Image (cartoon, helix red, strand yellow):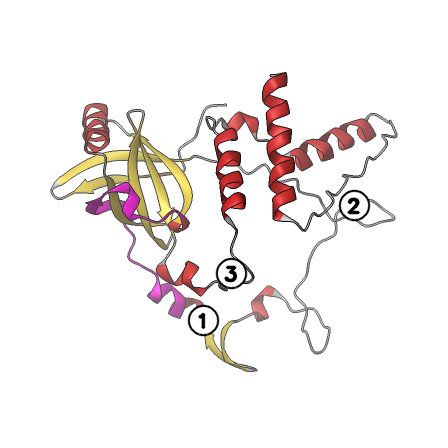
């Protein structure tokens, strides 16, 4: 299926503009179910209901409110919210270029592809230049009334754009609880290093699949054909308390797998 552009704009670097199209780089494959009436097997609609009286509230009677303290709301109407929206723009403005390692991985959010929109020569020249410098551009843009910060990079001669999370959304690892209990001894550390060596390999995304989704879809297809498939429960692994035993078992298992291969 051919990719379809979801937005158009101009990549702006100082006084230079490169027309681009934005494409989603991911496709949601989450298994979704419809909520049905048990008797009629027809879809059930959701309605807004007053939490205190239980009565249905129509759309015309609904207001938006921000809770500033328990039970106290600041009411905002549509005109007020519209006035607060960012100014509409079709420019993806590049603010600076940074080394890729300067942007922590937890800041990356959703990936998009940027494709040329007319002037292909300018597009591919910029992509080639960006890739040769091994830098990422930090960009700002507004799309569908929402402001975004992103990281622009070049991969295989094309431009890839990642939305970045705001600093307020990202939790620091420093806030995590400190490790408790004894530190691993020298033998355990050496075994852990050996385990890492045995697990060395190349990343291939095709090796990793949504097994739950595959089981659900297989089960649904069989039921749709009138079959009565048997369900096999996923066995839970037994817990082992000793780190030494866990590492030893893992190393032995990996060695057997490598010999068999």
- Left/right of residue 133 with respect to residue 159 in the rendered view: left
- Any part of residue 171 in sight: no
Q: Does the magenta stretch include residue 104?
A: yes
Residue wearing tag 3 = 179
Residue extending furthest toward the top: 261
- Left/right of residue 107 with respect to residue 135 in the rendered view: right
Residue toward you, 241 or 190: 190
Residue wearing tag 1 = 77
- Secondary structure under tag 3 reads loop
> Which of the 4 image quarters holds residue 58?
bottom right
Please provide the residue range marked out in magenta.
80-105
Query: Is residue 26 depicted above or below 175 in this figure?
Result: above
Residue wearing tag 2 = 42
**Category of crowding for the residue at label 1, using alpha-carbon neighbours closer than 10 angstroms: few (below 14), some (14–19), many (at least 20):** few
- Left/right of residue 149 with respect to residue 97 in the rendered view: right
Query: Is residue 171 depicted above or below 159 in this figure?
Result: below
Q: Is residue 247 magenta?
A: no
Taking the spot 51% from the left edge, 56% from the top edge, the residue there is: 183
The alpha-carbon separation of the residues under discs 2 and 3 comes to 52 Å
Say whether disc 1 or disc 2 marks the residue closer to the N-terminus.
2
**Category of crowding for the residue at label 3, using alpha-carbon neighbours closer than 10 angstroms: few (below 14), some (14–19), many (at least 20):** few
């Amino acid at each position: 299926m051919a990719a379809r552009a979801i937005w158009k704009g101009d990549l702006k670097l100082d006084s230079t503009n490169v027309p681009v199209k934005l494409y989603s780089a991911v496709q949601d494959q989450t298994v979704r179910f419809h909520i049905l009436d048990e008797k009629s097997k027809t879809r059930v609609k959701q309605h807004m209901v007053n939490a205190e009286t239980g009565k249905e509230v129509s759309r015309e009677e609904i207001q938006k409110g921000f809770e500033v303290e328990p039970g106290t709301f600041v009411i905002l109407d549509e005109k007020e919210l519209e006035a607060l929206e960012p100014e509409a723009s079709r420019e993806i403005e590049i603010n600076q270029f940074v080394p890729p390692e300067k942007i922590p991985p937890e800041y990356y959010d959703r990936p998009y592809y940027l494709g040329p929109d007319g002037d292909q020569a300018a597009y591919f020249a910029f992509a080639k230049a960006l890739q040769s410098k091994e830098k990422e551009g930090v960009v700002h843009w507004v799309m569908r009334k929402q402001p975004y910060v992103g990281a622009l990079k070049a991969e295989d001669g094309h431009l890839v754009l990642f939305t970045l999370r705001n600093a307020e959304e990202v939790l620091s690892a420093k806030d995590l609880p400190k490790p408790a209990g004894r530190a691993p001894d020298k033998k355990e550390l050496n075994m852990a290093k050996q385990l890492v060596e045995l697990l060395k390999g190349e990343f291939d995304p095709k090796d990793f699949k949504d097994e739950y989704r595959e089981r659900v879809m297989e089960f649904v297809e069989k039921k749709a054909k009138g079959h009565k498939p048997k369900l096999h429960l996923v066995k839970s692994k037994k817990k082992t308390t000793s780190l030494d035993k866990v590492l030893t078992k893992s190393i032995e298992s990996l060695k057997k797998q490598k010999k068999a291969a």
